[in-house]
Image (cartoon, grey):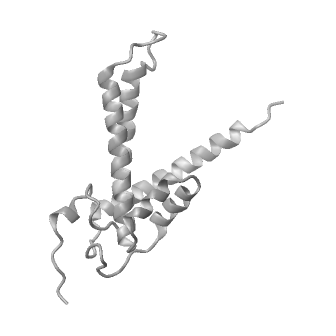
Amino acid sequence: MMLPPISKHVLNPFNPHGRFGRLSYLAWQTVIFLIAIPLNFYISYEMFGIGLTEPYKQLDLLALFLFVTLALFVVYSSLVFAIRRLHDCNRSGWFVLLLGMPYLNILMLVYLLIARGDYDSNRYAPVQPTATWEKIMAYIGLGLIFILSVLIFIVMTKSHTVLP
C-alpha cells in the first residue's frame, strides 16, 4: 500500500498537525530547554539587575517584553510538541489539557515519554522517521534529566538536614 507523502505542515515541528515519536519529542523539548534557559538568565539579569550593586534597578520594558515573549514561546512549543506526541499514540490533542492539572500533569509527562506510538499510519499522520540529530539530542535530554534529578535530590535532602 502506497502512503501519501508527508505534507510540509506536518514536517514543521511548531505545527500541531503530525506526529512525534518519543525521541523526537524529547529532542525538541531539549532544544527548547537549551535555548530558553540561557535566554531566561540573560533577560532576568537585564530585568532585575542580578549581581549589580544597585538595590533596585528600574524595570526595563524591553526586557519584560522579551521575558513574556520567551515564556509564551516555551509554553506554545511545549504544548504543540505534546499534541504531536499524543497524535503519535493515536490520542486526541485535547488530552494536552491534562498538563494543566496538578498531579495528573506528572502522569501525563511520564506517559508522553514512555508510551509507544503507532507503528503504522494513524488518523493523524503517517509515521515520521526520527532524524539522527533528534536521536542525539534526545539522549542529551535524558542525560540532563538524570543530572537535574540528582541535583534536585541532593538539594532536597540537604534542606531537610537537622543541624546540631
**Residue beneath the point at 29% across and 80% down:** 121
Instruction: In this rendered view, identify the residue nearer to me: 38 or 143.
Output: 38
**Residue beneath the point at 43% across and 20% down:** 48
Image mark count: 0
Instruction: In this rendered view, identify the residue nearer to me: 130 or 132.
Output: 130
**Residue farthest top in this picture:** 54
Instruction: In this rendered view, identify the residue nearer to me: 27 or 103.
Output: 103
Relative vertical location of residue 19 with respect to residue 50 in this rendering, above or below:
below
**Residue beneath the point at 39% across and 22% down:** 47
Q: Quadrant of the C terminus?
A: top right
Q: Position of residue 9 (x, y in %)?
A: 19, 62
Q: Position of residue 104 (x, y in %)?
A: 56, 58
Relative vertical location of residue 45 with respect to residue 111 in this rendering, above or below:
above
Q: Quadrant of the N terminus?
A: bottom left
**Residue farthest bottom in this picture:** 1
Query: Seen in the image, is 109 located left or right of residue 81?
Result: right
Relative vertical location of residue 131 with respect to residue 68 in this rendering, above or below:
below
Query: Seen in the image, is 163 located left or right of residue 52?
Result: right
Q: Position of residue 83 (x, y in %)?
A: 36, 62
